[in-house]
Each structure stands twice: as C-alpha cells, then as structure tokens.
Image (cartoon, rainbow, N blue to C red):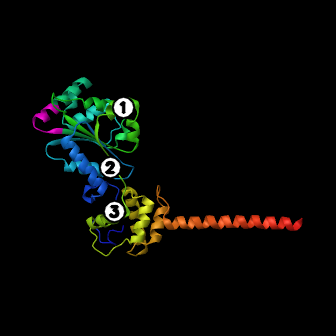
Amino acid sequence: MYQNHYNLRELPFTLTPNTSFYYDLAGHRSALEVLLTALETGEGFIKVVGEVGTGKTLLCRKLLNELPEQFVSAYIPNPYLTPDELRDQIARELHIDTAEHDNQQLLTQAIQQRLVDINKQGKTVVIVLDEAQALPADSLEALRLISNLETESRKLLHIVLFGQPELNERLAQREHRQLRQRIAFSYDLSSMSVHELAHYISHRLHIAGYKGPPIFSGRVVRQLHEASRGVPRLANVLCHKVLLLSYGEGVYTVTSKHVRTAIDDTEDVELTESKRGWLVAACLVILLAAVGVSYYQGWLTGLLR
C-alpha cells in the first residue's frame, strides 16, 4: 500500500465513518448545532436527511460523542426491524432485561418505567436511528407510539432520525402524517464545495500523519470535485485510488491522468471537464463527417443527372 510511500500512520481515505477523521464541514457543523439545540429546547422528532455518501453516519456518531451529560442515548444503527424487534432493541439499549418480559405490552411498560427512572435523575433519553428510510411502515408507527411516552409535564425521550431522501418520501405518505407533524426540527445535508474538498483532503492527510509538500494541485481538486459532486464518500474512493496510482508509478504528486483513470474505474461519478471536452470534440467530428458524407452524396447525385 501507499502508507510507507507517503509516510502515513494509517490510510486517510477509508470508507469507515471514523470520528477521528471528522472534518468540520459547514453543513455538518450547522446540522450538529441544530441537533444539539433541538435536543436542549425541543420535543418530539428531529430529522436529518442527506444523499448517499454525504456523511450521515459519521455525523450520527459525532452527535453521540458530543451529547451533553444530561442525555442518555440509545443507538439503532440498522432499523430494518419489525415493531417487536424495534422495541426489543430499544429496551436492550436502555439496559432492560428483555427475557423478564414475555410479551410486548409488558416490555413497553418496562421501557416507560425505565424512561421515568432516567427522568427522575434529571436526564432525558435520546433514541438515534441511522438509515431511518429503511424502517418498515408498521415500525414507523410503533416508533410514533413509543414517542407518546411522557409525564404530565414533559416528554420522556427525543427521537433523532438520520436518513436518505427516501425518508422524506416515506413521511409524505398520508399514513404517516401524525409522525410527520411531530418533527420539530429538520436539516438537509449538502455536499462539499470545491474549497471545502481541498481542505477536507488536506485535513484527512494531516490526521493520517502526512507532513510533506502538497500532493493534490488545484486543478486535480477541481477534477475530483466535479467527478464526486462534492460527496465525501465518492471523494474518498477517488482519493484512495489516485494515491494508489501515484504509488504504483513511483511518483508523489497526483496528476490529472491519475484522476481520469480513477474515474474510469469508479461507479456513480460524473465526467470531468476534460473528459467531457473530449466527448464533445468526438461528437463534433462525427457530426462534421456526417455532414461531409451527406454533401458528397448530394454533389454526386447532381453530377450523375
């Protein structure tokens, strides 16, 4: 691998949502501020939506690490669960022995009692669900019913939903209008600008231990941004591949050729400006050739008359 080639302690562009590599992107910073403010002041549901690869899971883990002491978290990373499985998972996250409750009604009562006990300690439970767009319809309804657990003066828990845009489509359905109306705060994650991508790349290299001269030129960063659309996951994939290519050639600086090769080998990326230029040029050549053939055929036909 290229770790020794660049004197790195670890690989800088892995796809694992490692919070030690967290970069304070403007969109992520705003989302985190909204989340923490909403938890401090709001009630009900909080929703964060972002396209695939925009860093929702990393932001989710960052939130769990940043939660103030007055919150007790229950993290559900894979919510593709039946209502019973969802309640079981929440109960286990709250350290409730599910084996002691042989039906769902008793388990729900145990969850409510646990929430009340935590509330008496001056704390509030936060249930955090990643990939919330995968929740089955009946589990979404079960989640809404769980959110009804409250005292006479306050809710006993907050629920934070992280999901892809499909989550908005799910919640827009009439059957989920009650849950939709309980969403007190919402935030849509955006992709990186080209300047953010430049800082993002530099930050990850620095965290990984790189101390040498710049590896990525401004032109290369612009190509990477256009190809990845500013999506962190795609940027990581491309950056990893171009570093492999430069290592394979025994060079240290990433070139436009490396970027084009990485793009050709990567799904869901867009044509770079230079590659699009070649495509347009090729189309023009074909068009001119077709016009030439048509003109020649017309001239020949006229000559033979």
The residue that appears at 45% across and 61% down in the rendered structure is 227
| Residues under numbered marks 2 and 1 in contact, where contact means CB atoms less than 8 Å apart | no
Instruction: Find numbered disc 1 in the image and state the secondary structure of the residue it sits on.
Output: helix
Q: Was residue 216 drawn as part of the magenta stretch in this picture? A: no
The residue that appears at 25% across and 47% down in the rendered structure is 34
Quadrant that contains the C terminus: bottom right
- On screen, residue 17 versus residue 95, left or right, reads right
- Specify the principal SS of the magenta part: helix
The magenta span reads 114-124
Q: Name which of mark 2 and mark 3 comes first in the sequence.
A: 2
Q: Is residue 142 something that shows in the picture? A: yes
Residue density around tag 2, few if under 14, some if 14–19, many if 20 or more, within 10 Å: many
- Percent x, y of residue 176: 36, 31
Quadrant housing residue 88: top left
The residue that appears at 23% across and 50% down in the rendered structure is 33
Q: Was residue 122 drawn as part of the magenta stretch in this picture? A: yes
Disc 2 vs disc 1: which is toward the camera?
1
Amino acid type indicated by mark 3: Glu
Q: Name which of mark 3 and mark 1 comes first in the sequence.
A: 1
Quadrant that contains the N terminus: bottom left
Mark 2 and mark 3: span between their CA atoms? 17 Å
| Residues under numbered marks 2 and 3 in contact, where contact means CB atoms less than 8 Å apart | no
Residue position marked by numbered label 1 in the rendering: 176
Q: Is residue 11 something that shows in the picture? A: no
| Residues under numbered marks 3 and 1 in contact, where contact means CB atoms less than 8 Å apart | no
Say above or below: 66 vs 255.
above
Which labelled disc corresponds to residue 56? Answer: 2
Residue position marked by numbered label 3 in the rendering: 196
* Extreme residue toward the left, this view: 121
